[in-house]
Image: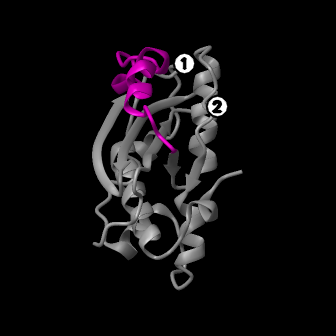
Amino acid sequence: MPKADMTGQVCVAIDFETSGREGNSACAVGLTRIEAGCLCTSYYTLLKPPSQRVLFSEIHGLTWQDLKDAPTFAEKWDEIASFCQGVDYFLAHNASFDRRVLAACLRYADLPACDVPFLCTLKGARKALRDIPSRSLDAVCRYFSIPLQHHHAASDARACAEIFLRLKNLGITEPQMLVR
């Protein structure tokens, strides 16, 4: 795959899995860093959610047994923030969801809000891939032949990063993916 022109730009693809409907119920986070158009490093951690009640186990496979001894979002924030240092954009597939979860987790942990803009690869896929019936993460990954272990935060974040680079190569720009 040719490298997208992103000279000097740093992006981090972010994906949360949640244990409930509340925004602050993150139970896993995956991050993949892109520097100058190349996938660099990844980060993944389980997170202990605020409630022992874990919904969506049938989707992401995580249970309270998996999460009860994990660190909280607040305990992992310094590592996450360090990984994201110098980022120009966060990327997410359906970015409004991940932006809402990040904001809620920061509020719940009494941490400062994040002002990094979000780009949405779902929005970009809707502009670039008009010939496929669905632009869901798994459908776009199939279209681009990107490996995916769907609803594992690390795999979803890496797939989002790869989709972003492919969309850039198709001519989709940051303003076209910006979440307002």
| Residue at x 32% of width, y 36% of height | 43
Vertical arrangement, residue 71 with respect to residue 5, above or below: above
Q: Quadrant of residue 28?
A: top left
How packed mark 1 is, by other alpha carbons closer than 10 Å (few <14, some 14-19, many 20 or more), is: some
Q: Could you tell whether 41 is left or right of 176 in the image?
A: left
What residue is pinned by disc 1?
Answer: 50
| Residue at x 36% of width, y 45% of height | 32
Q: Quadrant of residue 126?
A: bottom right
What residue is pinned by disc 2?
Answer: 22
Residues under numbered marks 2 and 1 in contact, where contact means CB atoms less than 8 Å apart: yes
Q: Secondary structure at mark 1?
A: loop
| Tag 1: amino acid | Pro
Q: Position of residue 86 (x, y in %)?
A: 45, 35
| Tag 2: amino acid | Glu
Q: Position of residue 137 (x, y in %)?
A: 46, 61
Residue 170 located within the stretch drawn in magenta: no
Instruction: Name the image quarter holding the N terminus.
Output: bottom left
Residue 78 located within the stretch drawn in magenta: yes
Q: Position of residue 47 (x, y in %)?
A: 42, 25
**How is the model colour-coded?**
one colour
Q: Give the residues drawn in magenta, as a range.
A: 64-88
Using the image as rendered, state which of residue 178 and residue 69 is in the foreground: 178
| Residue at x 45% of width, y 21% of height | 77
Vertical arrangement, residue 66 with respect to residue 111, above or below: below
Q: Secondary structure at mark 2?
A: loop
How far is the residue under mark 2 from the one under mark 1? Answer: 10 Å
Residue furthest out toward the bottom: 131
| Residue at x 58% of width, y 25% of height | 105
Tell me which secondary structure the magenta stretch mostly adopts. helix
Q: Could you tell whether 56 is left or right of 21 in the image?
A: left
